[in-house]
Amino acid sequence: MRRPVLIALAISCLIGSASAHAQIWPLRRYGSAPAKGATAIPANPQASFVATAGTDTLYFARRGITLSSNMFPTLSAQARWLIANPTMTARIEGYADQQDTRSYALAIGEERAAAVRDFLVLHGVAPDRLKVVSWGKEHPGAVPLAIAAPVGARVVTVVGDSGGPPLLGRR
Amino acid sequence: MLRLSLLAGAALASTAQTQIASPPNPDSATATVIAVPVLATSKNVETPSGTTWAVANQMTDVISDDLRSTTRFIVADVKNLRIPSYPEVTAPTYSEWTGVGAKALLTGFVEARPDGRLMIGCYVYDVRQQHELARAGFLVAPADWRRAAHKCADVAYSGVTGNGAMFDSRVAFVAQSGPATAPVKRIAVMDLDGTNLTYVTTGNTLAITPRWSPRTRRLAYTSFEGGEPHVVVVDLASDKEQSLLPGGTSFAPAFAPDGQSLVLSVAVNGNTDIYAVNADGSGLRRLTTSPAIDTEAEFSPDGKQIVFSSDRSGSQQLYVMNADGTGQRRISFGPGEYGAPAWSEDGKRIAFTNINGGSMRIGTMNVDGTDQDILTSGPYDSQPTWGPSSDHVMFERKNFATGHTSLFITAVDRPDPHPVATPQDGSDPSWIGREQ
């Protein structure tokens, strides 16, 4: 029993380090204690999400905006997790490369995140549980070692507890 | 003395005026050696900003620093020469200045007036031809002496190069601090020389892409407050902010030259298009409809056309359209991709970021896409903005070895990229001349 817990902890640490902007948009990622009798809410939703889907991050080719077939198993598993955890919402964050001009980066990040959102909706997740947001190239994540390192083009799906007022408003 | 009194009388009518007395100096293709002796003062009078003599000395330093900051000028060493007398401001002894190799001479005076203001006059001469190139007079509060110095430097800059003013200008930019993985980005504004710096946003919320309104009264920028990027317009005098299009994703704002409207990018269901909107947020109208990305719109200085970037062809390229969205046409056809366009103040050229071969570089082209000229070597130069004189662009340069991003400036005809002083990392500049 101890080993899976350690793995989950390790994964949550990784996620913690990848998320650069909790202070900008606090999201109650780790949820509150599950209410008795309700559907069990994972103690650490993001770790549970990653354990089911394999990853919360999908990498795109430079200037890529379409989902490739090797993303489908991950995305299908992400959709299954969201369907199995109906109180959870997801913020789908689009990112761009450092080599994109600044506003174009926002636009392409938005387009990538919307592609992931559309897949999840197509696979049964209610659209009002999903929020798309683009960070463009403002949060580079891991600092690239070289200018051409394409670590920027990605979509990160962050899940959280939607108990209380809905997190997802405007979209 | 006759000239001097005429100038003083004329300057009373308006706070500032410049007249170019002769065509541009034919030697303007190379750096001009200019002598800038200490400005004269007829009577040393105490003012709230120090004595007129002290103000004259400080102004002379600012003027020299301004001119030295471009490759157009070499400021001659005149510290061993005698300081010109008050009458010599308008009647220079030319032979003294040829002795230090000067081709141009800037003289001036600082005079306290009974109403508490300073009368400041500046004169620029061609030393070899022995005639006046330009002059200007300014009536300013003593605290505004620094701005008057920038204007004097502009008299020399315009008089010698024949181009527009450069130094009496403001820069809005993104000041960045904190670790690269979690940067704090806030909007700041400053004079071109780095003085008078103030922060427009607090740093609690990510803020990017500042753009001036004409006459530097307002600033539009993209705020991430609440989680989604959206365009905010802030009035700098009152600090009043308005979210232009609440409830949606909008970014990349740019004011029309008349300040009455803006263009910006709006993302709907993942697709970004260019819209125009009145400066109060009313009258939203769509200008592009392509299913590809259309963004980074900027007006021509006459307000009749808009340059923008789009990947509708499969790669990001530059396009020009009429201000109502009609007549869209591609203008960039060189190697690689193009983004972040900016239209020069004189309307003749468009600066851009070219992304090619793993490198980002700054270039300029004619508005029809011809005569492309790459100015910088990269590998990470982006977000160009023109200076008011249309002969310099400022841009951001990232140093991948240090991780720092800085503002740089370069002449466009003979590129000489050099850093612009900012207190922290700087990116995404918007550069504009101050109103007269």
Image (cartoon, rainbow, N blue to C red):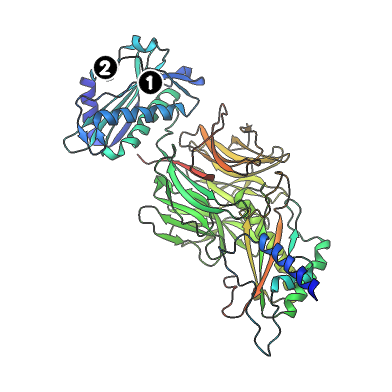
Q: Residues within 10 Å of mark 2 (few under 14, many from 20)?
A: some
Q: Residue at the far left: name it.
A: B114
Q: Which residue occupies 44% across, 39% down?
A: B194
The N terminus of chain A sits in image quarter: bottom right
Q: Which is more toward the observer, A124 or A28? A: A28
Check disc 1 and give the amino acid type. Answer: Ser
Sequence-first tag of 1 and 2 = 1
Q: Which residue occupies 75% across, 68% down?
A: A119
Asked whether, in this view, residue B152 is left or right of residue B301, the answer is: left
Asked whether, in this view, residue B303 is left or right of residue B110, the answer is: right
Q: Is residue A121 visible?
A: yes
Which subunit holds the residue at mark 1? B
Tell me the number on the disc at residue B230. none
Same-chain status of marks 1 and 2: yes
CA separation in Å, label 1 and label 2: 21 Å
Tell me the SS state at disc 1: loop
Q: Quadrant of residue B408?
A: top right
Tell me the SS state at disc 2: helix
Check disc 2 and give the amino acid type. Answer: Glu
Which residue in the protein does label 1 denote? B22
Tell me the number on the disc at residue B88. 2
Q: Which is more toward the observer, B87 or A127? A: B87
Which subunit holds the residue at mark 2? B
